[in-house]
Image (spheres, rainbow, N blue to C red):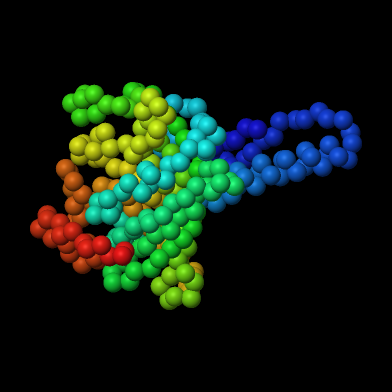
Amino acid sequence: MRIHENSHLYTLPSLTLPVHPFYSMLVSFSTKAALVFLLTGVATLPSESEQYRRQVLASSDLKPTELSRQYTARSFAPLWLHSDPDLVFGFIGDGYRRLQVKLLTIRPDAQQPGRYTVTGKAKVGTNITGFQGTFVLLHVRENKARPRAADDMPTKAVKAGIALVEYELREPEGQPTAGVFRGVLCTQWYQDRHGKLYYNDLQNYSDNYENNQFVGTWQSYKTGQVKRCNWGDYRMPNSGDFDQGAGEFSPQEKYWANGWQAFKGGGYQRDKAWWK
């Protein structure tokens, strides 16, 4: 099967099989199943999420070999739960209204390798809503370069890379401000010589360090309205002119009124554990 990245056209190779109804049925079923997986796994992503997915995979820092099948039996859950909630910054809507997200539980699905069940909470203003949903592994790629720590200090990392995941997180229906988050998540990881995966914070001293980047949308159940909605560790992806910080995250003054008052004057007043 050949996938044309730019057109979403999928070309299947010709097959030569004995002419028998049973074989025809198998070919038809396998072809349809492959197309359903491809279309639901990638083509249904929000447009910004799909653009981000392509951008990540096109990086010259990554090897081109797709390794998702080799990694489906291994759990990335500890890497997603590693995030410090005080360093997870997010926005919803064109005005960059502040969004806070806390993932509470992530469990691999024993019946569907590469799929995870997820619970968590989201906060916008004074409104706190729980959610539950899924992560589905789309891509795993390794970096070309060997992992490096600050000042080339020794590290247990022998290889590093990224994982791209499709997410759907649903808030409870029936609430006036509830909806569903959809998009793609990019996680940086490294691996030791024993094959254990770790959250890649080897470069967290650098000014532009980021990890666990969520790019997607939130859609209201009640109105059907769709809003841009991105968040991530240390920085937020695709935030335009919002983040003016050089050494660390810092929202522009004109956005402070949209939930970012804690950052006035360049400081940061950490929030209490709002998710408990």
**Is residue 5 visible from the viewing direction of this image?**
yes
145 displayed left or right of 246: right
Location of residue 246 by image quarter: top left
Which residue is depicted at the point 34% across and 57% down? Answer: 102
Measured from the top left, where is residue 258 in percent x and y?
Answer: 24, 66
Residue in view at x 27 percent, y 65 percent? 274
Question: Would residue 25 appear left or right of 224 to someone viewing this image?
Answer: right
Quick check: can you spot residue 254?
Answer: no
Camera-side residue: 1 or 275? Answer: 275
Residue drawn at the location 38% of the way across and 24% of the way down:
193
Residue 105 image offset from top left, x and y in percent: 41, 55
Where is residue 210 shown, x and y percent of the image? 29, 42
**Residue pictured at 47% horizontal, 50% vertical:** 107
Which residue is at the far left?
Answer: 265
Dividing the image into 4 quarters, which one contains the N terminus? top right
What quarter of the picture does the C terminus occupy?
A: bottom left
| Percent x, y of residue 195 | 42, 29
